Image (cartoon, helix red, strand yellow):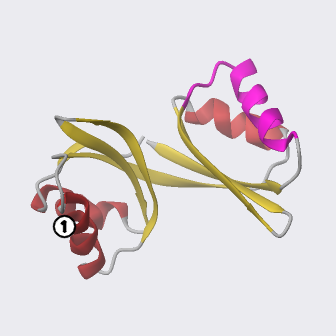
Amino acid sequence: MTEFVVSMENRPGRLAALTEALAAFGVNIEALTAYGRNGEGTVRLIVDDAPTTRRVLEEAALHNEERTVLTARLPHRPGELARLTRSIADAGINIEALYVLKSNADGIELAISVDQPETALPHLEVTGGVLVRGTG
């Protein structure tokens, strides 16, 4: 999976314009977070079509970064996320973003953006997580 981190002005209509442009090209948003600070906005999104998203962002002249995102499934019980994040931290890997994709009584599916994706893979399995998808 690929995460796009998009920088833009934090003003009315900017997020709407971005999501409308993606929708116009048939891109489905899998996960998104957006926040603003001091007039600057940041949108982090995971989509189902990275090449089309890349083209839409380029055509809109929006500064963006791409990151590989790992997806893991954990048991849905107290301490599982703490165990996962401690294992990753102890390996010297920085978590850039973490998304909850799905959550139910059977488990929780997470998308994790880290600075060292390949190094993080074994830590997903060590903590009881099941790797669902890697790079995309």
Instruction: Specify whether residue 24 is painted magenta.
Output: yes
Q: Is residue 116 above or below residue 61?
A: below
Of 21 and 110, nearer the camera is 110
Quarter of the image for the C terminus: give it.
top left
Residue 97's spot in the image, x, y percent?
48, 60
Q: Is residue 105 visible?
A: yes
Instruction: Specify whether residue 26 is painted magenta.
Output: yes
Quarter of the image for the N terminus: give it.
top left
Q: Is residue 9 above or below residue 21?
A: below
Looking at the image, which residue is at 49% across and 45% down?
Answer: 2
Report the side of 50 relative to 128 (left or right).
right
Q: Residues within 10 Å of mark 1 (few under 14, many from 20)?
A: some
Q: Is residue 21 above or below residue 57?
A: above
Residue 133's spot in the image, x, y percent?
30, 40
Kindly indicate the quadrant of the structure image that contains residue 85: bottom left
Three-letter amino acid code of the residue under disc 1: Arg
Give SS at disc 1. Answer: helix
Looking at the image, which residue is at 34% across and 47% down?
Answer: 110
Report the side of 85 relative to 7 (left or right).
left
Looking at the image, which residue is at 14% across and 55% down?
Answer: 125
Kindly indicate the quadrant of the structure image that contains residue 57: top right
- Name the magenta segment's main secondary structure: helix
Q: Which residue is mark 1?
A: 83
Residue 122's spot in the image, x, y percent?
17, 61
Looking at the image, which residue is at 19% across and 67% down?
Answer: 83
Disc tally is: 1
Which residues are the magenta region?
13-29
Report the side of 89 relative to 45 (left or right).
left
